[in-house]
Image (cartoon, rainbow, N blue to C red):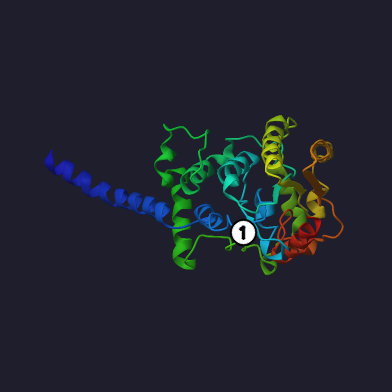
Amino acid sequence: MKKLIFKLIIFLLPIVLVFVFIECFYRIVPNNYSFKNENIQKRYQTTEVLILGNSHTFYGLNPVFFAKPAFNMSNVSQSLYFDKLIFDKHISKFKKLKYVVLNIEYTSLSQLKDTQEDSWRKYYYKSYMDLNVPIVSKFEYGNYFLSSTRSFNKNIKLVNRYFLQGTVIDCDLNGFGINYTKDKRFLNLSEIAIKTIKRHEDNLFDFSENISIIESIIHQCKQKGIEVILITMPVSEEYSKRVNKFKLDKIIKTAKLIEKRNPNVKYLNLFNDSRFVNDDFYDSDHLHTIGAKKCSLLVSAFL
């Protein structure tokens, strides 16, 4: 019996050590979430423009090209639900904040909380950004072991990337996504757009939950004399012509109605803006770093 237990320990030990190593990696190595959470706290005294949203603003709005000091707190697949959690945590700390930028695009108003997109990200927001995330239960395994939130293969790829590149952070000190460069842009936009639209389309038209979130942010900003900028980011022609036109029209009308009802709100719709061409995009719906410069200058001028 002792020999069996000894052999079992010898067999399990490498597995346990690998698990402990990966878990320590997740707890120690900085990523986009922890990096942004650390840096935004250093900008409380100077930030005048706070940018929220998903990958479209993460890769599309570069604070360097804003006339006023700005910080980008958006992230890949970040929903309005998490925008509000971030906003609620930090809003009272800013000393000079004048504008909050919210991304209103094809998926944001219908995106539900705690979907597949949030299956592992919700634990990141809680652990790395020190947010109170109501959709995370204290009984969930991922609440205590971050390495369990991704597959073993993805964990190994992330560790391997760190040892090859020395970092897993994809943004600069201002929170802007820096790895969508023009030289790496995709050329087959039509093919990519078809796959992207299929992935983005949720066939949902009830915006009430996310409208409530937006209105809550607007109300708090109004009390503090802060303007809210609703922005629909540009996409390639290949993407725009494939979306559900009825849903797109409802999104734009909703944004315009919110603007009309609130004196501290302005809406900028760049979805089909002719100033953007296919060469400005990294893929079918994301700007590359040079396209982001063009967009950032336009938004800065709009402010």
Residue at the spot 57% in from the left edge and 35% down from the top edge = 114
Question: With 17 as the anchor, is 272 left or right in this view?
Answer: right
* Rendering quarter of residue 60: bottom right
Mark 1, residues whose alpha carbon is within 10 Å: few (<14), some, or many (≥20)? Answer: some
Whole-percent x, y for residue 51 in the image: 67, 52
Say which element carries label 1.
Answer: loop
Residue occupied by mark 1: 46
In this view of the protein, which residue sits in the foreground, 6 or 149?
149
Instruction: Tell whether 140 sits left or right of 254.
Output: left
Query: Looking at this view, is 191 or 157 the one in front?
Result: 157
Q: Please identify the residue farthest to the right as the structure is shown.
A: 274
Circle 1: residue type:
Thr
Instruction: In the displayed orientation, state which residue is furthest to the bottom.
Output: 183
Direction from residue 183 to residue 126 in the image, left or right: left
Give the image location of residue 101, x and y in percent. Answer: 71, 49
- Quarter of the image for residue 160 reads bottom left
The total number of labels drawn is: 1
Quick check: 206 above or below 72?
above
